[in-house]
Amino acid sequence: MQKLALVTGAARGIGLETTRVFLREGWNVAMIDRDGDILAEEAAKLDGAMPFVCDVSDPDQVDATIAAVMGRLGRIDALVNNAGVADFGPIEDTDFKRWRTVMDTNLDGVFLMSQAATPALKATRGCLLNIASISGLRASTLRVAYGTSKAAVIHLTKQQAAELGEYGVRANCVCPGPVKTKLSMAVHSPEIIAAYHDAIPLNRYGSENEIAEVICFLCSDKASYVTGQIVASDGGFESTGVGLPALRV
């Protein structure tokens, strides 16, 4: 039977590219996003992709969406928790509302989706794949909420691997480094881009496809004995030390 991947934050960026790679590898994909218009537009271009509108930070929407996926497709073989909020700012400017906005999606959403999908994943001996960030592995300026949320996702992944392994469910985490997207190229100044290039051993940004390939590999049978692992897909950035002065304000 054809496998099904459920990908959150699938309307754009890494989530959309991950959907494309899964489809190329012969999977079906349930695309999850809270932006219904863009989600429907992108899903319509992809044979084997089905859109489901959901805010992953809302427990009721999460439960309804998992039920809808199971009712329509009958199985979940992989859950990719990609949906996230990128909000950067100094500690003193990060009020509690801003903190909670980041945590609601980046951490609570991963927990809620994973918990709701666990019975289906046990049935298929499937896998969880959580997207954290290089910011969860190394501290940097302006990332008190974002970095902390991603560090928590890293530990949550280890908890999931420890608890669900006896059911044949694997849990791994991918931590992207700087990725060349329309958004990053719009907000990163030439100074920041040059500083990243200098600090990354491969001397460049990654691509959405390079991240998606790692995600899909870890969800595949080729990684059947890999669980509880934190994989930095970052061009070697995590290995090189402290943050960049050019990213400070």
Image (cartoon, helix red, strand yellow):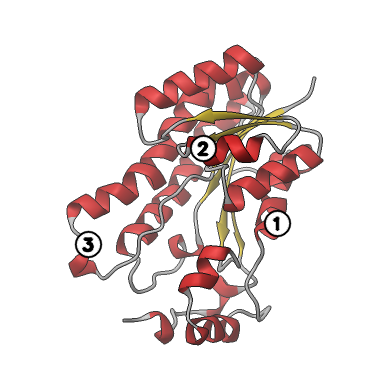
Residue toward you, 218 or 246: 246
Q: Amino acid at mark 1?
A: Asn
Return the x and y of residue 216 as percentages of the image width and height: 71, 45
Name the residue: 56% across, 43% down: 11
Element type at marker 3? loop
Residue beneath the point at 65% across and 80% down: 201
In the image: residue 86, left or right of residue 13: left
Q: Sequence order check: which comes first, mark 2 or mark 3?
A: 2
Q: Residue at x 78, y 24 (%)?
A: 2
Of helix, strand and loop, which one carries label 1? helix
The Cα–Cα distance between marks 3 and 1, rounded to whole angstroms, is 32 Å
Residue drawn at 31 percent across, 63 percent down: 144
Identify the amino acid type marked 2: Asp
Residue 226 seen in the current view: no
Say which mark, if any, is on residue 94. Answer: 3
In the rendered structure, find residue 209 and report the number of the disc placed on it. 1
Q: Is residue 140 above or below residue 162?
A: below
Q: Which mark is residue 162?
A: none
Q: Which residue is mark 2?
A: 37
Left or right: 233 in relation to 26 = left
Of badges 2 and 3, nearer the viewer stands 2
Query: Which corner quadrant holds the C terminus?
Result: bottom left
Q: Label 2: how many residues lie within 10 Å, few (<14), some (14-19) or many (20+)?
A: few
Q: Amino acid at mark 3?
A: Thr
